[in-house]
Image: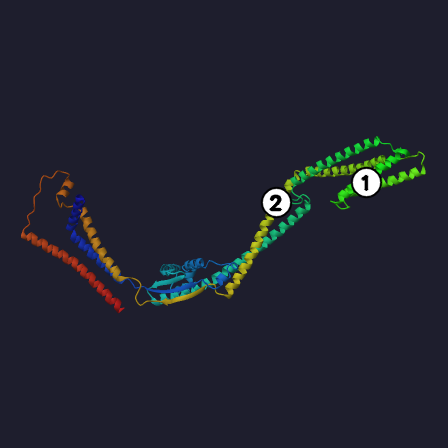
Amino acid sequence: MDQVLQQILGYAKAAWQRRWWGVAVAWLTCIVGWTWVMTIPDRYEASARVYVDTQTLLKPLLQGLTAEPNVEQQIKLMTRQLVSRPTLEKVARMTDLDVKAKTPEQTEGMLNGLAGKIAIGNAGQENLYTISYQDANADLAKKVVQSLLTIFVETSLGKTRQDISSSQRFIEEQLQQYQQKLTDAENALKEFKQKHIGMMPGQGGDYYAKLAEVSAQLRQAQLDQQEAVNRRNQLKQQLADEEPELAAAAAATTDGEIDSRIQALQKQMDQLRLQYTDLHPDIQANKRLVERLEAQKKADLAARKADPVGSKIQNPVYQQLTIAIAEADATVASLQARVGEYQRRYGELRGASNMVPQVEQEYTQLMRDYDVYRQNYDALLKRRESVTMSGEVESKTDTVDFRVIDPPFVPSQPAWPNRPMLLSLVTLGGLGAGVVVAFLLSQLRRTVTDRRVLRELTGLPLLGAVSRVETDETRRRKRKGLLTYLAALGSLIAAYGGVMILQLVMSRAG
């Protein structure tokens, strides 16, 4: 720490040796700076504040029914558009600045100057904006701000209507395109259904479910057919064991059997009537059998009366078996036809095993395209109604209200330059420049100020030092030089004070 402090003191001593150069540079810098500050032309700033009210009464009432524009984003965009080239050209025409520009180069310079002096920003509160412009001519600055304010309001009022109109045109074009796509998809779907009728998904289940169902029905029909054939064969075997005719003597015993069978069938029908109606197939079959038995009984009785000695009569069991065999043949024929139909269906489904999955895939793709077109078309219809209502609201009401809080105003005092601040900065800069020049000169032409510097410069060991004895004359010259130096610095400060007083007087007089 001591070494650093000694080094700093050494630099200070070396700079002190070049102090008069520093004073000269400080004076020169201050004189040049003060002259430049005093000759800077005044610029007056015109400003205006505008408030954009977006919280209208219709906004909560029409929420969800109309297209709500992002008003805040539009306003930010408009504030940036105010410094665009078309806007600057319009401002130049409104303020007659374009009259002074005779050449393209002058016009370009004039527009660049406008863009550099215009300031648009938030005034510290939401939706409150400040528009300002600086110029040497106070009236011109006020005209520029008024022009910008007019353009700001006009642009914001027409922007939403223009957006709604373009949105309506775009939606109408998209609706026409999607309507054509939807019509084409519907026609393609109709033709596809007509071409592949019976093979469409959802018509009695999909293909594999149909195939499994027909296969199960075919197996069941074959089983029923086999059972009917076996029953028929068994009846034929029973018929072979029976005699077609019986002697009259055995008919008496046969009548008793017929009566017992009739009673048993009637008892069975009574049991069935407890659960079913007379239209039940089992009840109808028993009725027919009872009627045949009674008819057989009457026929046997008539035969015995006609030939009471020993004529033969028909065997009722044989006749019943014959009737049962006929019914079994009919059942077998019906089941055979059913088996043939199921075999045909199964063969058709097996033959279409490669075609049905492809049909289902194409149908699924057609339905997917159709659903997408229909959903987009319905969404566009809703958007069209929403945009139409938004256009009605925009044309008949004010969704955004612009209020000029402060009209364009130009203060009597110039906004630029701030001469007291600039004069102070020039003075501080001149003093700093003097210190820097003195230090640099001391480093360019180094002098030995103490033993440490001598040891560092030579790199040799220092054996001793000879002290300087000052006389009264040298001390008097040193005090005189110090007073002269302080007088030079004091005169610089006094000059700064005089310049500040002159500026104050000039500002009050202006």
- Percent across and percent down for residue 201 are 64, 44
Q: Is residue 254 left or right of residue 426?
A: right
Rendered image: mark on residue 487 = none
Closer to us: 172 or 419: 172
In the picture, which quadrant includes the N terminus?
top left
Q: Residues within 10 Å of mark 1 (few under 14, many from 20)?
A: few
Label 2 or label 1, whichever lies nearer to me, is: 1
Q: Is residue 255 left or right of residue 338?
A: right
Residue extending farthest left: 472
- Whether residue 314 appears in this view of the structure is no
**What element does badge 2 sit on?**
helix
Q: Quadrant of residue 251?
A: top right
Q: Which mark sits nearer the N-terminus, 2 or 1?
A: 1
Q: Residues within 10 Å of mark 2 (few under 14, many from 20)?
A: some
- Whether residue 263 appears in this view of the structure is yes
Q: Residue at x 20, y 62 (%)?
A: 497
In this picture, is 278 found above or below 120? above
Q: Quadrant of residue 118?
A: bottom left
Residue indicated by mark 2: 364
Looking at the rendered structure, the kind of residue marked 1 is Gln
